[in-house]
Image: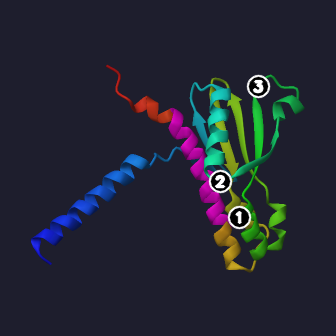
Amino acid sequence: MNIKSLRYMFLIMLTLIFSYKSFSWEDFVDHKSGYYYVVLENANFDRVNAKLVEKIEQNNWHIIHTLNVDKTINSKTPYKTHLLCSKERLKNGVGYFKPIGLIAPCRIAIYKDGHDVVIMTEDLEEVIQLYKPKNKKAYECIKRVQKEMIQILNATANEFKRKAHIPQY
């Protein structure tokens, strides 16, 4: 390799590194046994929910129904559970493991906790362990879906949390 080729490769690597940094987001999601969650401090529920719905759709998932938990239990504290489906993921899942319908649809819950808004999704990798599918591709499919659910939580949180990192002058 000559010097010109090395410089070219170096520039490509720098471009990739900086473009990855500029288009990625922080990992705001935490995990507890059974679910992943993110807490948005001092957040407006309606604004966060609207952004969550937008991020769900941007990630090629569809809300097939929203449970208004707050209305069902006559609570004044906002609480919704969005039932999600991806036709492609469901088709793959059924092909690998017929009882996947017991796990589907995916769920993302959002609720107000004092001044904060909490968004959470179940840990599908833990749930699939209950069924012990023999097909390894079923696990891979669930991992892919889990990653997408976490990505939706992170993308939503990024819309609200990154603004806190802007220096105040």
- Could you say whether the residue bearing mark 3 is in a helix, strand or loop? loop
* Residue at the disc numbered 1: 88
Between 73 and 15, the one nearer to me in the picture: 15
**Farthest residue in the top direction?**
169
Q: Type of residue at label 3?
A: Thr
Say whether marks 2 and 1 touch (CB < 8 Å).
Answer: yes
Q: Quadrant of the N terminus?
A: bottom left
Task: Using the image, tell me which numbered label, if any, was put on residue 7.
Answer: none
Q: Nearer the viewer, mark 1 or mark 3?
A: 1
The residue sitting at 83% across, 72% down in the picture is 98
Q: From the viewer's side, name the closer residue of 64 and 29.
A: 64
Q: Is residue 64 magenta?
A: no
User: Looking at the picture, does residue 80 appear above or below residue 59?
Assistant: above
Task: Please state which amino acid type lies under the numbered disc 2.
Answer: Asn
Q: As drawn, is 168 to the left or to the right of 132?
A: left
Residue span colored magenta: 142-160
Q: Nearer the viewer, residue 147 or 128?
A: 147
Q: CA distance from mark 2 to mark 3?
A: 29 Å
Q: Which residue is mark 3?
A: 77
Q: Measuring from the top left, give residue 138's x and y in whole percent.
A: 71, 73
Residue 132, compared with residue 116, is above or below; it is below
What amino acid is labelled 1 in the image? Glu
From mark 2 to mark 1, how far is it between C-alphas?
A: 9 Å
Residue beneath disc 2: 60
Indicate the position of residue 3 as horizontal and vertical percent values: 10, 71
First of labels 2, 3 by sequence position: 2
Q: Residue furthest left?
A: 3
Circles 2, 3 touching at the beta carbon (< 8 Å):
no
- Whether the residues at callouts 1 and 3 have beta carbons within 8 Å, the answer is no
